Image: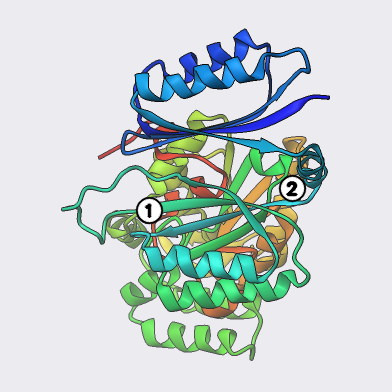
Amino acid sequence: MKQLFLINVTGQDRPGVTASLTEILSSGQAQVLDVGQAVIHDSLSLGILVAADEDCDVDTMLHKINNLSSCENIQVSVLPIAQKDYQQWVDEQEKPRHIVTVLGRAISAEHIARISREVAKHGLNIDKINRLSGRIALDADINQAKACVEFSLRGTTSDLQELRSAFLSVASELNIDIAYQEDNIYRRYRRLVVFDMDSTLIEAEVIDELAKEAGVGEQVAAITEQAMRGEIDFKESFRRRVGLLKGLDESVLERVAERIKMTEGAEMLISTLCALGYKTGILSGGFTYFANRLQQQLGIDYIHANQLEIENGKVTGRVVGEVVDGARKAALLRQIAAQENITLEQVIAVGDGANDLPMLSLAGLGIAFRAKPIVRQTAKQAISNIGLDGVLYLIGFRDRDWLNKKP
């Protein structure tokens, strides 16, 4: 009958510790059943679960391991494991696994405590905690910093919606973002990321900026409020607002485009996605003039937005072709996914408005970015407290993995 041991090693990290330990285990022809190692601030934590055959000289092997403790200035503990306990551990590997991603400008002990408590309350077990963000300098500007910790969970909760609601409440109270996802193959193989444009990729609502230039800002804002109250649908409100732009000089579009800023993290996110082979797209209820500029600046693959009709250098107050509303965004997402020969589970959609909800719900990963409360509550995930490049954390990238970093 095999003998099972869990060997835990802690102490100052240095090259060769793992090699020395596993060489001793190798001399006894031990089988490694599980292994995990982490180093935090040069402090080593190593665990190895091994099985030794009946003919193995276990006493000699364990004596060598204990001697290693004094030679390497580390602490070693050896715990016998019953075979029934090991079998239970084997059986549990079939349980569902989930990922909880915590994002913010900084992560505190309170954040981890509150999240861990909710996890335990809902019958889930934390297998692993990893830091995805880079180390933050003590004198760093907290308003520019970003921090991310990822929890790997195992088990089944009886009420997933209740857990999501609890996370949403904690996130709102502590000014952090908490994303909860199933840990499946699709999470690691997303291939297409589509974005809303206004207030998502750029820090403005273009139609509002154009309305100010046309001197109809208040009228456009009033129509927007009607739409938000559900008194008129998006297409009707859009046509009314565009109609108020009639007579605007075409040169104003260039002036507005020059002053609009890209959202924090947008350039980092798009350049990284492109470098990694992802396809990207803009599905916008805004205007092609501005989407085309972003395509040129960022190298985005697909552009679908509304084309302002211009005659004799003046805006006519109409758009050319079908209006891109929420339903149209969802249809375009399906179309692009089919064109790329990928499943909807492999699509990420990012947006901030109610007209983005159809595509957010359709995508495998729908992210409400700095969105209105109703959108945050409805979308699968939300990012409100850091920049757009936080999307990379939700697909498991670490800061050290990211390409084309910019200061």
Which numbered circle lies on residue 345? 2
Q: Residue 8, how many percent across, how many down?
A: 52, 34
Amino acid type of the residue that numbered disc 2 sits on in the rendered structure: Glu
> Which of labels 1 and 2 is toward the front?
1
Q: Can residue 403 be seen in this view?
A: no
Residue under label 1: 147
| Pick the front one: 251 or 204 | 204
Image colouring: rainbow
Report the residue at 79% width, 50% height from top: 95
Report the residue at 52% width, 66% height from top: 115
> Quick one: label 2, few (<14), some, or many (20+) residues within 10 Å?
some
> Quick one: label 1, few (<14), some, or many (20+) residues within 10 Å?
many
Report the residue at 41% width, 49% height from top: 266
| Pick the front one: 5 or 327 | 5
Amino acid type of the residue that numbered disc 1 sits on in the rendered structure: Ala
| 353 w.r.t. 35: above or below | below
Q: Residue 291, how many percent across, how many down?
A: 48, 51
Using the rendered view, name the quadrant where residue 360 is placed. Answer: bottom right
Mark 1, secondary structure of its residue: strand
**219 left or right, relative to 367:** left
Q: Residue 287, how many percent across, how many down?
A: 50, 59
Using the rendered view, name the quadrant where residue 164 is placed. Answer: bottom right
Q: In which quarter of the image is the C terminus?
A: top left
Q: Quadrant of the N terminus?
A: top right
Q: Earlier in the sequence, mark 1 or mark 2?
A: 1
Q: For marks 1 and 2, give the CA distance.
A: 27 Å
Q: Can residue 249 be seen in this view?
A: yes
